[in-house]
Amino acid sequence: MWLVVIVLGVLSVATIALHRGEQISAMWLVVAAFCCYALGYRFYSAFISAKVLALDPNRATPAERLDNGRDFVPTNKWVVFGHHFAAIAGPGPLVGPVLAAQFGYLPGTLWILAGSVLGGCVQDFVILLFSVRRDGKSMTEMAREEIGQMGGFVAYLAVISIIVILLCACALIVVNALKSSPWGVFTIAMTIPIAILMGLYIRRLRPGRVLESSILGFVLVLIAIWGGQWVSQTPPVAALFTYSATTLAIVIIIYGFAASALPVWLLLAPRDYLSTFVKLGTIGMLALGIIIARPTLHMPALTRFIDGSGPVFAGTIFPFAFITIACGAISGFHSLISSGTTPKLIRREHETRMVGYGAMMAESLVAIMATIAACVLQPGTYFAINSPAGVVGQSPEAAAATISNWGFFVTAADMHGLAQSVGEQTLFNRTGGAPVFAVGMANIFSHSLGGQAVMAIWYHFAIMFEALFILTVLDAGTRVGRFMIQDALGHIWKPFGRTSWYPSILGTSALIVAAWGFFLWQGVKDPLGGINSLWPLFGISNQLLAIVALCVATTIIVKMGKTRYIAVTLLPLVWLVAVTFTASWQKIFSDDPRLGFLSHARQLELSGAGPDLARRIFNDRLDAAVAGLLVVLVALILAESLREWVRVLSGRKEARVKEAPFVATRFTAEEQA
Amino acid sequence: MPRGKSFRFASAIGRLSQLSRGSVSLFVAALREVFDESAYARFLQRNALSPSRRSYAEFLNENEQGKARRPRCC
């Protein structure tokens, strides 16, 4: 049977890679993905389990040894898989592949498959196992213990930085998706009272009935989507929900502050439940829609923008395709989840393979579906939606002419018709990835369920799904950031560390919201499209966190005496170092003003005119400083890890890992009985 | 239909229905874990409490820190 899988896998990858000049079915991508995942899981993860990690079925996990019915609970592996996947699946694998589709469908697809099977899944798996063997310790704690104080410090700073950059990039995507869209704004605005109603339902009416209230919330959201159509078609009401990007940015900043400072049960927790419910359902529906509709990819395998001249974001395939895909292939953020709640639920050591490696495969499949959603659109439509006005021109006619000149035919009338069919005033210059994904998803859904008549409903369902997803990341992330700042400030003055002391709550909430709010404001005001700067910065910081995780993993493998298998984590580490360091260098020092922060600042200085000149120059220099700081921090942890490996391998330091002592599991005996 | 074949058919149907029942209960268990319903059930069992507004408020208070710190990935 495995021979058939290999043949099918080779055939589908060859079809994707070698077909030029004619359109292919999206099913080739799905088949290639399933074959790669099946082979990766069956052979590569089995090799890592047996040879590198030596998973021991007789060793008790912390969930068994420290079982307290609260944090540590031995749980069925499928239940842990669902729990872990719900935590790692975010907006990244949806947005990243959509943006990377400007290079064509081929680079993104190949990196999603290879990057996940050989990098992302491996990282999630090994970090989960190492955390399980250390009583569920966090990544920063493992970094401190195994690499040194510097490791813990850098991991902490990297996490804070990635949270700030992630939050502003996410907020900008929501702003771009909702600007001048009364239907979208109404639907998303309605999710706030719906979440509060759910919070009251769970706490007061039917205590603890979360699933029940999530289903109720989902039905109310569907009613809100349907009501949004009426809002958009009733001019006086539509005017109440039509906002510019700057107004939306202010509203989102205020929302982020409120979500961080309000009690969790009132807004954050019910919204999290609602978002999870919609997320799991929609991902399943999208997979089903693709299989039923079997759409054709209209985007070519490679576009002319592989040379770095793309309108969606600047930069060549290497390194920017790998940076932009982000969580769809490998995500440093996952290492926080793999060393967070998940290791405390694992019942048997060998289940880390299915949970760690397997859940990342599922996440990667989501990224493949996002690639398909973007590439089923006509390329002209894709670029018209996803290109900023500063690049293609302010008027629909100018934008259509510019894009047609690139060889991707589109007319202003086509775009007007498409906008009308999805209930929007315009779809030009809706950068950020979310609107393209929504149009692609609506396209797939309308072909498999309901036809063109319900295209607008599906489009706004997709927008609601993404915005809800992103706002959940925004409020949870703001709160996590607030706690991290409180932890750090608590070392300076104890009351700052008290999470129930309101002056500290308000002060630290304001601090974290100001940090991401500043970058959001900068992104909204940038005429070239802020996502051009912010998404690569997010990708860089996320991959740098993956470097920290892989440094920790490689150090532990060296200390385990398994140096002959070091390539398992060292190869992805070397690749990520090459990608992120090159990307950071280019973002800071490139002579192309569309790409390099400093050359863009110089260009602005030379032009000597334009609104907010001084502020824009300052922003460019700040972006360069942030990218530089991240690289320096990660270079430090890399050097520290390298020193540790040399000391252990040369015999100057004893190769000793800091694992919890072996205790035999009682589950083996129970199973045998 | 010969007796042997009908017996095999019936036992296959039985296995299938057992499998689908098992899959559904596992799926519901996963949803209950994701949506913290199992955590609340464990809280009630641990503290010998019955479901009520008060016990749920206590559960939320206990979980507030952990919940707030639980990151949602990008």
Image (cartoon, rainbow, N blue to C red):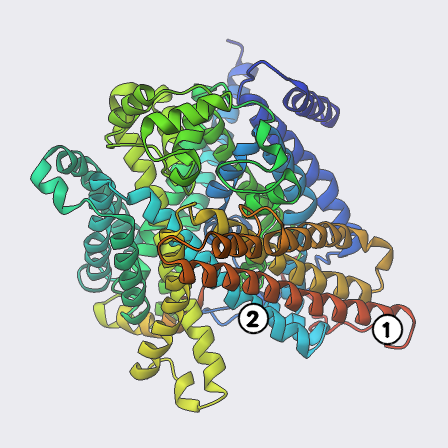
Mark 1: give few (<14), some (14-19) or many (20+) Cα within 10 Å. some
Chain letter of the residue beneath label 1 in the structure image: A
- Residue that appears at 28% across and 70% down: A263
Q: Is A1 situated left or right of A502 in this image?
A: right
Residue on which the image places disc 2: A157
Q: What's the residue type where badge 1 is placed? A: Arg
- Residue that appears at 14% across and 38% down: A231
CB under 8 Å between callouts 2 and 1? Answer: no
- Residue that appears at 76% across and 65% down: A555
In x, y percent, where is residue A139?
Answer: 61, 67
Against B22, residue A20 (above or below) is above
Mark 2: give few (<14), some (14-19) or many (20+) Cα within 10 Å. some
Q: Is A306 situated left or right of B12 in this image?
A: right
Q: What's the residue type where badge 2 is placed? A: Leu
Against A673, residue A360 (above or below) is above
Q: Is A335 situated left or right of A439 in this image?
A: right
Tell me, yes or no, if residue A669 can be seen here.
no
Q: Residue furthest left?
A: A236
In x, y percent, where is residue A416?
Answer: 28, 24
In x, y percent, where is residue A175?
Answer: 33, 49
